[in-house]
């Protein structure tokens, strides 16, 4: 298991993406945190993940976001730790976290766009993933 910001496991990378989307608007809402915790607790990709790592991963994300070139470094870490077959999974989790609080601001939308670009998510696939997230997070 990685101990330094120089490497992320695939699960660390997925957690980092979710935290990045949540933190992108500089406000981490309770609904977003609950969504992240629920995802980590229930999805098979996190079956052997030590949930205590989430705090450390979050700290790394916050530190990188405070640096001038931090976003580039963030995506470098994520891409290095995330197998290509999990790129769409990462985008789907990002969309779920972004939709969790029922509002998508311009900053979150830009972060999702950046994730799509950095992980090379096909636009048609991204639209399907986004539509699924919208459907899962509708309210009455």
Image (cartoon, rainbow, N blue to C red):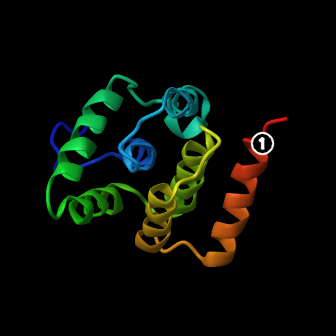
Report the residue at 27% width, 45% height from top: 61
Screen quadrant of the N terminus: top left
Report the residue at 68% width, 60% height from top: 129
- Give residue 86's position: percent from left, percent from top: 51, 57
Taking the view exactly as shown, the residue that stands out farthest to the right is: 140
- Give residue 59's position: percent from left, percent from top: 23, 36
Question: Foreground: 111 or 25?
Answer: 25
- Give residue 14's position: percent from left, percent from top: 44, 47
Q: Is residue 1 left or right of residue 128?
A: left
Question: Foreground: 36 or 105?
Answer: 105
Q: How many marks?
A: 1
Find disc 1 in the rendering and name its residue.
138
Report the residue at 73% width, 65% height from top: 128
Taking the view exactly as shown, the residue that stands out farthest to the top is: 52
Report the residue at 59% width, 76% height from top: 122
Q: Is residue 109 left or right of residue 54?
A: right
Helix, strand or loop at disc 1? loop
- Give residue 78's position: percent from left, percent from top: 33, 56
Callout 1 crowding tier (Cα within 10 Å): few <14, some 14–19, many ≥20:
few
Screen quadrant of the C terminus: top right
Question: Foreground: 17 or 40?
Answer: 17
Image position of 39 with respect to 13: above or below? above
């Amino acid at each position: 298991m990685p101990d330094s910001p120089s490497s992320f496991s695939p699960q660390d990378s997925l957690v980092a993406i979710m935290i990045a989307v949540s933190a992108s608007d500089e406000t981490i809402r309770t609904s977003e945190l609950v969504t992240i915790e629920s995802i980590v607790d229930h999805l098979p990709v996190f079956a052997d993940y030590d949930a205590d790592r989430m705090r450390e991963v979050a700290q790394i994300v916050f530190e990188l976001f405070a640096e001038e070139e931090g976003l580039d470094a963030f995506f470098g870490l994520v891409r290095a730790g995330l197998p290509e077959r999990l790129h769409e999974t990462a985008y789907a989790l990002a969309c779920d976290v972004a939709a969790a609080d029922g509002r998508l601001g311009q900053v979150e939308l830009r972060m999702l766009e950046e994730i799509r670009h950095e992980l090379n998510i096909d636009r048609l696939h991204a639209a399907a993933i986004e539509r699924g997230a919208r459907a899962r997070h509708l309210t009455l």
